[in-house]
């Protein structure tokens, strides 16, 4: 992709400007009860070595059997990434020795992955969006885990993760800033969560990224890249990129050159350090696994999965904008997390007139509810105000029973005390006064008490705001603001 370079993405070096080029290899644990080639459980946090079948422990003579659910999940993910699905793919052995890899090889896919090229649309903070190409998605096994802190002079091995299915999702080198890379991983994670193909929990290691970074002068060919292995938080991905790009620029500006190497990110120091050079890179001696036939399925199998896909964030965003008039920004906030979108949709379902009040409901969900939850560091699941309670509050505003201002008081009551919003409005006399006689009296009183201001307002019509405020105050916030405004205009001769 050769999109024009936005000046803000360039880094100023001592000798001029540089552009970073970033490509990510994301490892996402497939949501599935059983492992890729065995029936052992994938549950997190079991006793060490309690979820290990003979296949996972690589006992001699054991044969892998493909788990169809993992295949379905990979295909569904490919469809969610608008990618080509390969009806025939091949499992290869990637050979290397590591104590937590009992087979002595990882079963992966190399030349023939299950999913080919696709793309992800990524929204950025400034409202712009970029398209990041997907190179491929392949299925592979996870390794076990070495534990070095259990004994003074021994390492322990936990094979619970051994054989768990991973999807490796490889992007094209289409990102040009750490912000873009963070936004890409965020979007990818959102898509996986909507699909239910990976829980995206980076703290548990369900999602981690190898981050490839190079730098170049704008318009020049790509530079030599370094690969930062296994970065396990979105914030660290951003920090690793920033540090690595600056390190490379420093070397190049001093007249040096970049060695292609694998590096590690140290979150405590915020820097990357060398792990192994290209010369030390493994030769994995890939070859097709003779224990497994090529993976083949029909287009009908793919079509059936496609027909069953849930609505994904981009489609949901378009629908929220089209059906309810949300701003693209608000729609993006709501679809950004699956839980947020679900909550908003539950509010919509509770509204008497969603088409009329859907936009108002979005404001209330984002500003009042999410704002308050954020302030109190609570999750949506911990919200004291339910979707149906919020829908009732929005209904009351939409139908004109309470003003927006009273609604904030009502929200506060529901938040702290709970209760049915409509019943609360009745019981506590919070209804908007639409009785024109009562409003007229309040207007007359205010105008009569302020003859000087009433005289000025003819020259300075914006002063009507002051009168509206006074009448609203006199009514305890319950007068209908539109009725007050109209009446004042008549009375003041505007
Ligand atoms: P490998 O198999 O050796 O890891 P790939 O060609 O599959 O190599 O690339 C791995 C990742 O590196 C991809 O995500 C790709 O986008 C990224 N990449 C390739 N070239 C560059 C580059 N010059 N700068 C930054 N990233 C790159
Ligand atoms: Mg790689």
Image (spheres, rainbow, N blue to C red):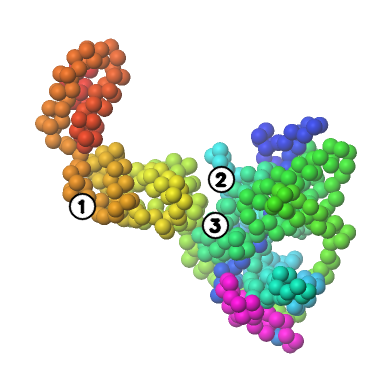
Asked whether disc 1 touches disc 2, contact meaning CB atoms under 8 Å apart, the reply is no
Determine whether the residue tagged by mark 3 lies in a helix, strand or loop: helix
Magenta-colored span:
35-61
User: Where's residue 317, x and y in %?
Assistant: 47, 49
Asked whether disc 2 touches disc 3, contact meaning CB atoms under 8 Å apart, the reply is no
Task: Classify mark 2: residues with Cα within 10 Å, few (<14), some (14-19) or many (20+).
Answer: many
Structural distance between the alpha carbons of marks 1 and 2: 42 Å
Q: Quadrant of ligand 1?
A: bottom right
- Where 97 falls versus 250 (above or below)? below
**Residue depth check, mark 1 versus mark 2: number of the one nearer the observer:** 1
| Residue closer to the observer: 157 or 395 | 157
Q: Residue at 77%, 75% (x, y): give it.
A: 154
| Residue closer to the observer: 369 or 72 | 369
Residue 225 visible at all: yes
| Quarter of image, res 143 | bottom right
| Quarter of image, res 85 | bottom right
Question: Would you name the residue on which mark 3 appears?
Answer: 191
Closer to the chain start, of discs 3 and 1, is 3
| Quarter of image, res 82 | bottom right
Q: Where residue 298 is drawn, which disc sits there?
A: none
Question: Would you name the residue on which mark 1 appears?
Answer: 423
Determine whether the residue tagged by mark 1 lies in a helix, strand or loop: helix
Question: Would you name the residue on which mark 2 appears?
Answer: 123
Structural distance between the alpha carbons of marks 2 and 3: 13 Å
Structural distance between the alpha carbons of marks 3 and 1: 40 Å
């Amino acid at each position: 992709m050769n999109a024009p370079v936005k000046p803000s993405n360039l880094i100023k070096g001592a000798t001029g400007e540089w552009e970073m080029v970033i490509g990510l290899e994301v490892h996402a644990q497939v949501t599935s009860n059983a492992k890729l080639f065995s029936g052992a459980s994938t549950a997190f946090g079991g006793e060490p070595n309690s979820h290990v079948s003979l296949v996972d422990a690589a006992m001699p003579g054991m044969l892998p059997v493909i788990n169809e659910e993992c295949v379905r999940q990979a295909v569904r993910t490919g469809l969610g990434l608008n990618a080509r699905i390969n009806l025939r793919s091949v499992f290869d052995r990637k050979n290397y020795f590591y104590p937590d890899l009992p087979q002595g090889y990882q079963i992966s896919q190399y030349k023939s992955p299950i999913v080919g090229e696709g793309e992800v649309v990524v929204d950025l903070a400034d409202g712009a969006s970029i398209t990041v190409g997907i190179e491929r998605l392949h299925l592979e096994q996870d390794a076990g885990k070495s534990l070095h802190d259990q004994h003074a002079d021994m390492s322990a091995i936990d094979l619970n993760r051994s054989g768990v299915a991973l999807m490796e999702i490889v992007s094209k080198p289409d990102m040009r800033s750490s912000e873009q890379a963070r936004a890409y991983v965020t979007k990818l994670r959102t898509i996986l969560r909507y699909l239910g193909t990976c829980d995206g929990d980076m703290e548990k290691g369900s999602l981690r990224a190898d981050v490839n970074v190079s730098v170049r002068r704008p318009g020049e060919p790509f530079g030599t890249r370094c690969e930062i292995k296994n970065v396990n938080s979105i914030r660290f991905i951003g920090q690793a990129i920033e540090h690595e790009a600056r390190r490379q620029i420093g070397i190049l500006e001093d007249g040096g050159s970049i060695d292609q190497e694998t590096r590690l990110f140290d979150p405590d120091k915020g820097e990357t350090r060398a792990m192994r050079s290209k010369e030390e890179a493994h030769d994995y001696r890939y070859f097709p696994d003779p224990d497994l036939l090529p993976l083949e399925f029909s287009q009908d199998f793919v079509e059936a999965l496609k027909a069953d896909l849930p609505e994904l964030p981009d489609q949901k965003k378009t629908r929220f904008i089209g059906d309810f008039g949300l701003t693209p920004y608000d729609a993006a906030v709501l679809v950004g997390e699956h839980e947020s979108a679900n909550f908003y949709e539950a509010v919509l379902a509770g509204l008497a007139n969603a088409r009329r009040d859907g936009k108002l409901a979005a404001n209330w969900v984002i500003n009042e509810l999410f704002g308050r939850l954020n302030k109190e560091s609570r999750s949506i699941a911990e919200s004291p105000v339910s979707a149906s309670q919020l829908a009732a509050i929005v209904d009351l505003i939409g139908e004109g029973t309470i003003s927006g201002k009273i609604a904030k008081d009502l929200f506060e009551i529901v938040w702290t005390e709970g209760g049915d919003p409509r019943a609360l409005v009745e019981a506590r006399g919070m209804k908007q006064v639409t009785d024109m006689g009562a409003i007229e009296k309040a207007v007359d009183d205010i105008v009569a008490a302020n003859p000087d201001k009433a005289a000025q307002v003819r020259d300075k019509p914006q002063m009507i705001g002051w009168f509206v405020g006074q009448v609203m105050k006199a009514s305890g916030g319950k007068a209908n603001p539109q009725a007050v405004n109209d009446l004042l205009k008549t009375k003041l001769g505007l």
